[in-house]
Image (cartoon, rainbow, N blue to C red):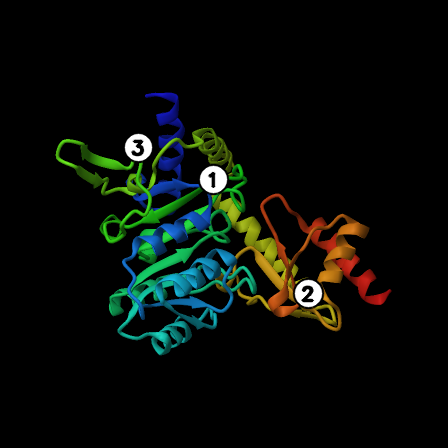
Amino acid sequence: MTATHQAKILPAVLLAALLGVTPEEIAFTRNATDGINLTLAGIDWQPGDEVIITDEEHEAINHPTMYLHNTKGVVVRRVSVSPDAAVMRSRLEAAWSPRTRLAALSFVSCESGTRLPGQAIADWAREKGVLSLLDGAQVTGAMKVDLREIGCDFYTSNGHKWMSAPKGTGFFYGKRESLLKLSPAHVGAGSLETYDLATETAVPFSTGQRFEFGTRAWGLTAGWSASLDWFESLGWDNVYGHVAALADHFKERIQERPGLRLLTPVKAEESAGLTSFVIEGHEAQKVSQAMREQHNIFLRVIPHYNAIRVSTAHFNNEEDIDKLMRGLEAYRTQ
């Protein structure tokens, strides 16, 4: 086994085991956005075809779907997020038409931190003959994910957020039968199983390898393998439990403080490691700047809601939350 082959195979095996799939169903990418674009570019869109997204999407979904609208005449339908399966099915049903080709939704909203009912979404899409794509950028490494149980056609995520992997690492998953429904937009050395210049034959692999072309930075992927090994040594259940417990603690602290309004669902099963909240009567951007300059605390601003978003990761603890709460209280009363 060559060093390049080893750098690719080992993390693929670890990721597949973590997600409940096979290594052959995984393609390595640079980030979650790559997987979204592999899906969108792989569908033979016709003018008037439709895609359903949510109204709390990251640019990774908003931008390429808007580009599809501008270049292909694809209609983008938006639904509001809910952790409730029946509610989400109802909203998807209301947005559906016979022209709907794809439902591309964030598994956990990057804005409110709401965890969508992934399995219910995948079930609905399958019943309607619609492909399903879940963006797991705020999921993988923060909570347990069993893609076989969820049943979505495609799933995309990155390594640099909740998995402490190098920037420039990501993966794209597709069911074996669903991968064949996408036509690779980019093809190069490594992505074709059969090619013959004499007969002009070019047949992509039926596995995730169909999306891996050209020279790649496999050293970054090897770095991801080291990260996965480290998490395995900690125990993934311990990691998930810590993230959830810390998020629960933080939400409790927010709810007990006047002037703070929680946006993220309280229940752990309806959220993940993100917590978003509003500081009533204050601009989130100014709060974030003050926390950074005065307390060396870095927060994410959600302009859509004039809100602050906090990630309670495996490397955080309750003292970090206490420090933030003291800083927020000082800011509100100054």
- Compared to residue 270, the image places residue 153 above or below, namely above
Label 2: which secondary element: helix
Residue under circle 3?
189
Q: Position of residue 68 (x, y in %)?
A: 39, 61
- Compared to residue 299, the image places residue 235 above or below, namely above
Residue in view at x 43 percent, y 60 percent: 67
- Compared to residue 294, the image places residue 72 above or below, namely below
Residue under circle 1?
169
In three-dimensional space, the C-alpha distance between marks 2 and 1, rounded to whole angstroms, equals: 34 Å
Q: Position of residue 262 (x, y in %)?
A: 63, 68
Residue under circle 2?
254
> Which quadrant of the view contains residue 61?
bottom left
Q: Residues within 10 Å of mark 1 (few under 14, many from 20)?
A: many
Q: Quadrant of the C terminus?
A: bottom right
**Between discs 1 and 3, the one toward the N terminus:** 1
Q: Position of residue 295 (x, y in %)?
A: 79, 50
Amino acid at circle 1: Thr
In three-dimensional space, the C-alpha distance between marks 3 and 2, rounded to whole angstroms, equals: 52 Å
Residue in view at x 19 percent, y 35 percent: 194
Q: Residues within 10 Å of mark 3 (few under 14, many from 20)?
A: few
- The answer to whether mark 3 and mark 2 are in CB contact below 8 A is no
- Counting every numbered tag in the picture gives 3
Amino acid at circle 3: Ala
Q: Residues within 10 Å of mark 2 (few under 14, many from 20)?
A: some
**Between discs 3 and 2, the one toward the N terminus:** 3
Amino acid at circle 2: Ile
Label 3: which secondary element: loop
- The answer to whether mark 2 and mark 1 are in CB contact below 8 A is no
